[in-house]
Image (spheres, rainbow, N blue to C red):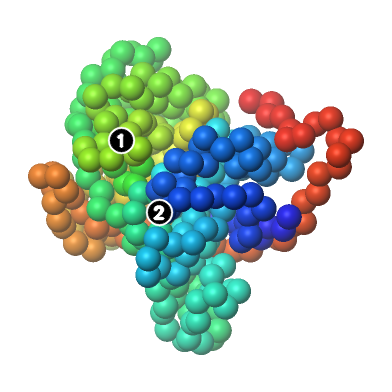
Amino acid sequence: MSTVDYHTAGEPFRIVAEPPVALPGQSVAERRARAIDSPDAQRLRELLCFEPRGHADMYGGFVVPPDDGAHLGVLFWHKDGFSTACGHGTIALGVWAVDTGIVGAPRDGTVDVVIDVPSGRVTARVHREAGRSVAVDFVNVASYVIARDVPLNTSRGELAVTVSYGGAIYACVDAASAGLRVDPGHYQDLITLGREVKWALNDSPHAVHPSDPRLSGVYGTILFEDLGVADGQVHQRNVTVFADGEVDRSPCGSGTCARLAVLAEQDSAVTLRHESIVGSVFAGTVLATTTVDGRAAVIPQVTGMAYRTGEHTFVVDPADPLVPGFVLR
């Protein structure tokens, strides 16, 4: 089995163009639901995520047929399961689709790579200069606030948590309110608090998607640090702790959309310089406003870039006792 690996702003994305297991379904959302119940799909996901072939923070996707009219579909995965959305992965898929010729692209200019993901249809708008991809705009599904300032008792006192949706549901916490900074020195404390907040809210009414129960549940906790406003941009640094204690090295694509939805309630023209815990940056803007199930919502755009890091051919020795592998966290 072969993969092509990219990183987007430091976060890995392992692409399996031809998954060697059946991933049936009438839609990408249905394929995800069935993959969750498939021992073969789960074993393949674990094989590619777990050590010694992966690591606790590995991320990737199986390319699958689109619903209708898109260029491709994808099932996103990580060490704990299959996710509903992934902005950094969408950016990587856009670059990969152009790099491989799946989607024809101009030498100079832009091309849209349309992708069906479990949360809906998204676009990776790939910008080209002199025959090279130089930036990608991730245009996401409508994003909105679900609940503001939910009081939550934690090991760091009572915190106000805002829950918002950007293709997945996120719990947003001001790191300073918990006595933390978003920097590598607070890495373990940020993971601990992120997991605590996620599991405290995951089965609550605040984590219920208004129309599709398959999208319910808190996917991750965004711990953010406000760095002020410069050149008309809101500047924030964040770390997104997703799944069960995994850390996004990028500023988190779908998480950036969830943050834009929160900020846009006060200013729909907001632009966000969103920095990650490793210093990489996404630019977030609001393309349009809309409504979803009676809620004010935005169509967000997140700009970043992905770079190929390698290609792999994985094998499984039938005598290997460590298959699919292990995770030491």
Question: Residue 55, percent across and down?
Answer: 67, 38
- Amino acid type, mark 2: Ser
Q: Residue at x 55, y 25 (%)?
A: 188
Residue 117: assigned label: none
How far apart are the alpha carbons under marks 2 and 1? Answer: 16 Å
Residue 18 on image: x %, y %: 63, 60
User: Which residue has dot 1 on it?
Assistant: 213
State the image coordinates of residue 39 (x, y, percent, origin top left).
61, 35
Asked whether residue 296 is in view, the answer is: yes
Quadrant of res 70 = bottom left
Q: For the N terminus, which image quadrant?
A: bottom right
The mark closer to the camera, 2 or 1, is 2
Rendered position, 15 above or below 32: below
Task: Indicate the position of residue 296 as horizontal and vertical percent values.
Answer: 13, 47
Earlier residue among tags 2 and 1: 2
Which residue in the protein does label 2 denote? 27
Compared with residue 245, is residue 231 higher up or lower down, i.e. above or below?
Answer: below
Q: Quadrant of residue 112?
A: bottom left
Kindly give the residue lying farthest to the right in the view shown: 319
- Above or below — where is 280 with respect to 165? below
Task: Choose top left, top right, bottom left or bottom right for residue 15.
Answer: bottom right
Could you classify mark 1 by the number of other residues whose Cα lies within 10 Å: few (under 14), some (14-19), or many (20 or more)?
A: few
Is residue 280 visible to us here? no
Q: Residue at x 59, y 74 (%)?
A: 99
Residue count near mark 2 (Cα–Cα under 10 Å), binned few <14, some 14–19, many ≥20? some
Classify mark 1: helix, strand or loop: helix
Q: In front here: 328 or 118?
A: 118
Outermost residue, left side: 294
